[in-house]
Image (cartoon, rainbow, N blue to C red):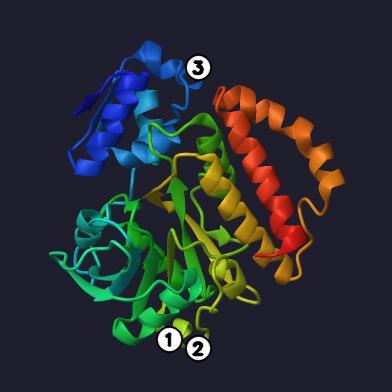
């Protein structure tokens, strides 16, 4: 498809094309290009990694866009990576992109619940869901590659050199694991997009990071054997990262974001914050008084996210308090 504007309809079509694997050409005229900041959620550092080609009438804008393109593949690579994907629904969205990487990728699907029985181009292992930690930890018995890449079933690595960039970074020798940059879907709401930008910001250099994130984390298999993933229900990546050296590779983009819904936000925040407190971290919302004092902070994101965002903000805040005060 060809992207020429950034209307709500165009963003939805853009996302549909990404899900189907359709090639996408970005074409912007000078006027629209110079008004990128005025366009809702239109950032070249987030759009350029997702498209097949870019055609802009302004040479300066063209050059700026090229900086953010997804990494191209490199011929002659021989590294082998096992991509581990827990899955309780259909075929993982990123399967096609994983198989197109310039490194050899063996896809291992940990199928549970309503997950698939068989998937072309992947090994499917039926496993009971035992929480995020134990389920992923059990994958080690099926891995015989030099590297392992933990991801999720609704994420798509962008560019044939995405995993290769992660391998190169971990081979520098400074890191026990490296984390990919997350890029929101084109039709993601403004609050979600802003949160992801803060969590994994754009950049051009590998830097240290505070923890792994199983939306996109690569490590040597030997490291995983030496330091197994903890058997915790959630926040297993935060637990594992304690006393580990974690690097961040912003040049390796992975497309991923969720639709915000109050019930899911409450449950996730409750469970994660219970684990963070168990790790010894100070609670974000330790008591009801703190909950009340935090209420003014929901106003700005509510205005940015629209009428339904108030329920989302309250659900997150209540989940943080509940998890800290009452545990998981």
Element type at mark 3:
helix
**Circles 3, 2 touching at the beta carbon (< 8 Å):** no
Q: Earlier in the sequence, mark 3 or mark 2?
A: 3
Q: Could you give the CA–CA distance between mark 1 and mark 3, rounded to whole angstroms?
A: 48 Å
Q: Which residue position holds label 1?
A: 222
Q: CB under 8 Å between callouts 2 and 1? A: yes
Taking 27 as reference, is 267 above or below it? below
Taking the spot 48% from the left edge, 70% from the top edge, the residue there is 131
Can the viewer see residue 27? yes
Label 2 packing within 10 angstroms: few (<14), some (14-19), many (20+): few
- The one of 129 and 234 positioned closer to us in this rendering: 129
- Please name the residue shown 59% across and 72% down the image: 241
Work out which residue is located at the far right of the displayed protein and give it. 289
Q: Quadrant of residue 232?
A: bottom right
Quadrant the C terminus occupies: bottom right
**Marks 1 and 3 close (CB-CB < 8 Å):** no
Q: Tell me where residue 179 appears, x and y as whole percent.
A: 48, 61
Residue nearest the observer in this picture, 6 or 109: 109
Query: Quick one: label 3, few (<14), some, or many (20+) residues within 10 Å?
Result: few
Please state the horizontal and vertical placement of residue 242, each as a whole percent of the image: 64, 74
Q: Which residue is mark 2?
A: 226
In the depicted structure, whether residue 113 falls above or below residue 19: below
Name the image quarter holding residue 2.
Answer: top left
Residue labelled with disc 3: 38
């Amino acid at each position: 498809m060809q992207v020429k504007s950034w209307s709500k309809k165009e963003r939805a079509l853009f996302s549909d094309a990404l899900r189907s694997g359709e090639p996408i050409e970005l074409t912007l005229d000078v006027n629209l290009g110079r008004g990128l900041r005025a366009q809702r959620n239109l950032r070249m550092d987030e759009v350029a990694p997702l498209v097949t080609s870019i055609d802009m009438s302004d040479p300066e804008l063209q050059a700026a866009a090229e900086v953010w393109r997804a990494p191209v593949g490199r011929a002659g690579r021989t590294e082998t990576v096992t991509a581990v994907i827990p899955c309780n629904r259909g075929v993982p969205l990123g399967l096609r992109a994983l198989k197109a990487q310039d490194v050899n990728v063996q896809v291992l699907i940990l199928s549970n619940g309503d997950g698939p029985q068989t998937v072309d181009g992947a090994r499917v292992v039926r496993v009971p869901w035992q929480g995020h930690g134990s389920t992923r930890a059990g994958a080690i018995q099926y891995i015989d590659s030099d590297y392992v890449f933990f991801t999720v079933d609704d994420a798509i690595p962008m560019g044939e050199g995405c995993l290769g960039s992660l391998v190169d970074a971990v081979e520098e020798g400074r890191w026990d694991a490296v984390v990919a940059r997350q890029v929101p879907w084109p039709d993601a709401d403004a609050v979600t997009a802003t949160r992801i930008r803060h969590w994994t910001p754009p950049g051009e250099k590998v830097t240290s990071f505070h923890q792994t994130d199983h939306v996109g984390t690569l490590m040597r298999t030997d490291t995983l054997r030496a330091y197994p993933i903890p058997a915790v229900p959630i926040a297993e990546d935060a637990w594992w990262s304690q006393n580990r050296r974690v690097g961040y590779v912003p040049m390796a983009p992975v497309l991923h974001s969720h639709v915000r819904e109050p019930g899911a936000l409450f449950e996730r925040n409750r469970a994660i914050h219970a684990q963070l407190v168990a790790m010894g971290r100070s609670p974000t919302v330790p008591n009801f008084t703190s909950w009340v004092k935090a209420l003014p902070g929901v106003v700005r994101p509510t205005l940015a996210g629209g009428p339904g965002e108030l329920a989302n903000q309250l659900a997150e805040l209540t989940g943080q308090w509940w998890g800290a005060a009452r545990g998981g």
